[in-house]
Image (cartoon, helix red, strand yellow):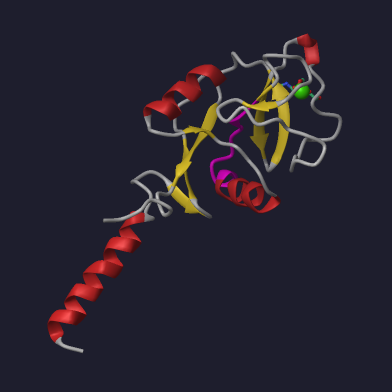
Amino acid sequence: MSPLTTVLLSLLLLGFAASSNCPDGWVHFGTSCYHFSHDTESMPVADLVCQHLDGHLVEIESSEENTYLASKAAALKASFWTGLSDMQQESVWLWYDSGRHLTSTSFQHWFPNEPNNAGMDENCAYISSGSWNDAPCHLALHYICEKDDGSSEIVG
Ligand code: 2F8
Ligand code: CA
């Protein structure tokens, strides 16, 4: 292989690698980038901040993703808003941004006896130590934003 071909191939490979990178302040897992907030916000404002960062509040779809997020959050010792809410209809849990329903076959990882709608005012779900709890949406908590890592985008 000529030196020129080697350089061109290296640049091409670097280009592919760069296309699946996450921005500074985001971590990579699967095909997503995740940002663990430093500030605290109500759940609806947290979602607006995530959208401002070209993402959305996290949508947790598998045990692997949940375990990864829990491992990252453990070091930060905080509870984080997810994008899961039943604010439209009590007990009908939806991922706020995609509109996907949480069904009996969906991955879910509630604390025992949750969600319990304590005080009849708990319509948003946070993750804490890998388990989920419903809590009042107006509480100011940390939050996790998610966005696609761009790896499925067509380059060129
Ligand atoms: O005991 C479960 C109960 O614990 C807390 O209330 C005392 C939670 N509240 C918040 O996290 C704000 C409830 O959501 C939870 O059900
Ligand atoms: Ca609760």
- Give the quarter the ligand 1 occupies: top right
Q: Examine the rendered structure and indicate whether residue 115 appears above or below residue 130.
A: above
- Horizontal placement of 115 versus 61: left or right? right
| Position of residue 27 measured from the top left corner of the image (x, y, whole percent) | 45, 49
Q: Examine the rendered structure and indicate whether residue 24 appears above or below residue 16.
A: above
Bounds of the magenta span? 73-84
Q: Examine the rendered structure and indicate whether residue 64 appears above or below residue 82.
A: below
Q: Which image quarter holds the N terminus? A: bottom left
Residue at the left extreme, as displayed: 4
Quarter holding residue 117? top right
Q: Which image quarter holds the C terminus? A: bottom left
Q: Is residue 79 magenta?
A: yes
- Horizontal placement of 154 versus 130: left or right? left
Which residue is rendered at x = 63% and y = 41% of the image? 60
Which residue is rendered at x = 68% and y = 48% of the image? 62
Which residue is rendered at x = 86% and y = 30% of the image? 113
Query: Who is closer to the viewer here, 98 or 51?
Result: 98
Residue 75, visible in the rendered structure: yes
Query: Who is closer to the viewer here, 115 or 96?
Result: 96
Query: Who is closer to the viewer here, 30 or 40?
Result: 30
Q: How many marks?
A: 0
